[in-house]
Image (spheres, rainbow, N blue to C red):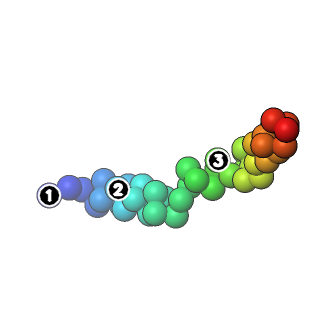
Amino acid sequence: MASPAKQTGLIRKRKKTKMGNKRKAKLRNQGSTKSETELFADEQGK
């Protein structure tokens, strides 16, 4: 059986994943707003 510390570590790791830490960090750093080139790409072709 795993030690209590190991079990706690695994539980916390899984909780972090469930809470979406990677996704939230990506939104903080890169933002969710699309760039101008992505938004207006079809207008430049006209």
User: Residue 29: horizontal and vertical position, in percent?
Assistant: 72, 44
Amino acid type of the residue tagged 2 in the rendering = Leu
Foreground of the two, 18 or 40: 40
Q: Residue at x 46, y 63 (%)?
A: 18
Q: Residue at x 38, y 55 (%)?
A: 9
Let me know if residue 12 appears in the view.
no
Q: Residue at x 72, y 53 (%)?
A: 32
Let me know if residue 11 appears in the view.
yes
Residue 37 image-quadrant placement: top right
Q: Residue furthest top?
A: 45
Amino acid type of the residue tagged 3 in the rendering = Lys
- Label annotation for residue 10: 2
Cα distance between the residues tagged 1 and 2: 14 Å
Amino acid type of the residue tagged 1 in the rendering = Met
Say whether residue 7 is left or right of residue 36.
left
Foreground of the two, 1 or 18: 18
Q: Secondary structure at mark 3?
A: helix
Number of other residues with Cα within 10 Å of mark 3, as a class: few under 14, some 14 to 19, many 20 or more:
few
Q: Tell me whether circle 3 and circle 2 mark residues in contact (CB < 8 Å).
A: no
Q: Tell me whether circle 1 and circle 3 mark residues in contact (CB < 8 Å).
A: no
Circle 1 is placed at which residue position? 1
Of tags 1 and 2, which is closer to the observer?
2
Number of other residues with Cα within 10 Å of mark 1, as a class: few under 14, some 14 to 19, many 20 or more:
few
Say whether residue 12 is left or right of residue 2.
right
